[in-house]
Amino acid sequence: MNTSTAKPPELSNSPVAAGKKVYIETYGCQMNVADSELVSRILAEAGHQIIEAPDKAEVILLNTCAVREHAEERVIGRASQLYGLRNRTPNLTIGILGCMAQHLAKSLPQRAPFVDLVMGPDSYRRLPQILADTAEETLLDLRLSRDENYVGIDPVRKVGTNAWVTIIRGCDKFCTFCIVPYVRGRERSVDSGEILRLVGNIAREGSREVTLLGQTVNSYEDGHMDFAELLRAVSAVGGIERVRFTSPYPRDFTAATIEAMAALPQVCPALHLPVQSGSNAQLEAMQRGYSIEQYRTLVKQLRRAIPNLALTTDIIVGFCGETEEDFQATLSLMKEIRYDSAFMFKYSERDGTYAHKKMPDDICEEVKKDRLQQVIKLQEQISYEVNQQMRGKIVEVLVEGPSKRQTKTGPNNYGRSPQGKVVVFPQQAAPNTFVQVQIDKTTSHTLFGDLVQV
Ligand code: SF4
């Protein structure tokens, strides 16, 4: 547990670089989206202008993800494509930010020599100063910090129904397959006073829902509040009507957190609870820190306390040493728990992790692909059946706006149920308002219905 109550350093505010047009493109998880919002504020405070398209940009920043290899290849390809804009803007600066910057620090200048700056996720306060410096060689700033929580910076958010608030940065768990602790640094909780200040501002700006973010969000502890107490404090902020959080770490769930989730009407009955595998041997190999029996007990406690809880998860197939028996245990667990949905992946090695250094990647690609297809097929069926149970029911929906889904009757709107499900309906409704929708049709991913008065 690390805490940070340090006074924030001043934002760098360089008049030399002020006034540049900056375009930011974001890859990966919600933590990265939240970091791009922070970077936007830091640059805006320094006098730069954030723009929505790359063609007129003088600075292009790609905020990257290192968790999956194909994401890295995508980013390098995209950076190379954007480099073509130098024909039009000769002084164009291209920067790589975030986890991938941290992960590929050494090889990036060779793999993408046109990149001007490479910056890890704890260095963003120095971005204005670095943009002001002119250098022939690629500028690297990859220091990882034990206390950088970007206190005092209000991210630039697009006002909508939901706002993301990072409450804990980094991770101390060191699961053997995962690169995150190496690229995002050690776990540290944002001061609860700062979180409540940010949530108060979000409510004043008009968002009605807040999602608390962290790699292990429920490990939160700032020396004043633990996660359960923080949930209570955030739920008490006037104007905030829905509170979500992602992703919790199964081993760090406490009885107090379950009690708070059950007691607070603002906390949505939706939980992403990564399991990764249904086999104890695999959980041990991954160093997940819990057994499948403990996970199962936790699910029972949660479902007993919160009967309408929607559960989602992450599953990896084909991790080092996964036998057919291990894989069957994952399928059995999925049938038993019946998740509402899941993110499913086949294992791919990330260099720098414990598994890459010490464990043979010994499941052949064909088997990995086949197992992935099997879990996807099973989950699609379960999601479909779970959603079917919603037919005829009335759900409260927080409206987000026009849906991309056209039907024979014309355009649709959409929003989310408390369980986080996308609900599509044809009637008009203002974004950021609550409506009641009676569900008449479902797929494995979406609920459809009509507005009703209750
Ligand atoms: S808990 Fe494990 S999987 Fe999650 S970010 Fe930390 S090391 Fe990675």
Image (cartoon, rainbow, N blue to C red):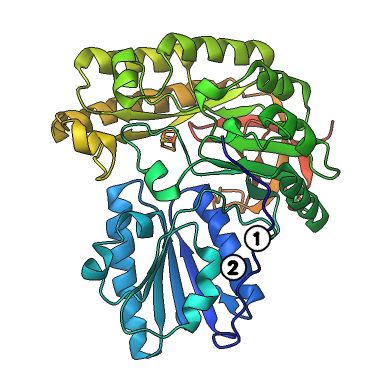
In the image shown, does 262 or 46 lie closer to the viewer? 46
Name the N-terminal-most of marks 2 and 1. Answer: 2
- Report the residue marked by disc 2: 40
Residue 319: x, y in percent?
25, 28
Q: Position of residue 234 (x, y in %)?
A: 76, 38
Report x, y in % for residue 134.
41, 86
Of helix, strand and loop, which one carries label 1?
loop
Looking at the image, which residue sits at the far front?
6
Disc 1: CA contacts within 10 A as few (<14), some (14-19) or many (>=20): many
Check disc 2 and give the amino acid type: Ser
Asked where in the image residue 262 lies, by quadrant, the reply is: top right
- Horizontal arrangement in the rendering, residue 179 relative to residue 433 (left or right): left
Q: Residues within 10 Å of mark 2 (few under 14, many from 20)?
A: many
> Which residue position is annotated with label 1?
155
43 or 13: nearer the eye? Answer: 13
> Count of labels shown?
2
The quadrant of the image that shows the C terminus is: top right
Can residue 204 be seen in this snapshot? Answer: yes
Q: Is residue 162 left or right of residue 65?
A: right
| Nearer the observer, 406 or 308 | 308
Q: Is residue 398 above or below residue 135?
A: above
Residue type indicated by callout 1: Pro
Q: Quadrant of ligand 1?
A: top left
Give yes or no for contact between labels 2 and 1 (Cβ–Cβ under 8 Å).
Answer: yes
